[in-house]
Image: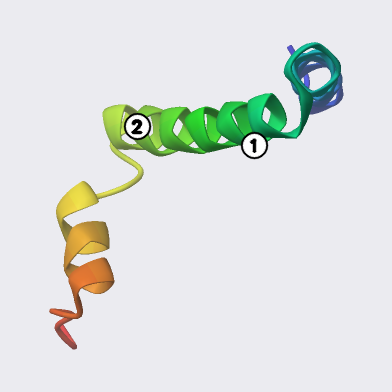
Amino acid sequence: MNMTVLGIGIGAFVAFMSFQFGLWGFLVSLLFMGIGALLGRAADGKLDLRSVWDAVTGRRSSS
């Protein structure tokens, strides 16, 4: 599956959520999609959630 088809699918899902549930459905679906993307990258090993959490809480290290 190429990225264009994936983008069309995501756009169709978000459009459906906004038409069906209004602004809040749109925003909640975007929030869950973002969380899913972060967890998917972490499962692939491309994102270290501990370093993200340290950056969010202000405990970044320079190493």
Q: How is the image coloured?
A: rainbow
Amino acid marked by disc 2: Leu
Left or right, 43 with reference to 54? right
The kind of residue tagged 1 is Leu
Quarter occupied by the C terminus: bottom left
Q: Which is in the foreground here, disc 2 or disc 1? A: 1
Q: Position of residue 57 (x, y in %)?
A: 19, 72
Number of numbered tags placed on the structure image: 2
Q: Which residue does the numbered mark 2 point to in the structure image?
A: 39
Q: Which quadrant is the N terminus positioned in? A: top right
Please, what secondary structure does the residue beneath circle 1 have?
helix
- Kindly indicate the quadrant of the structure image that contains residue 53: bottom left
Asked which secondary structure carries label 2, the reply is: helix
List x then y, in percent, for residue 12: 84, 16
Q: Residue at x 27, y 60 (%)?
A: 52
* 21 sits left or right of 49 in the view: right
Q: Give the residue at mark 1.
A: 27
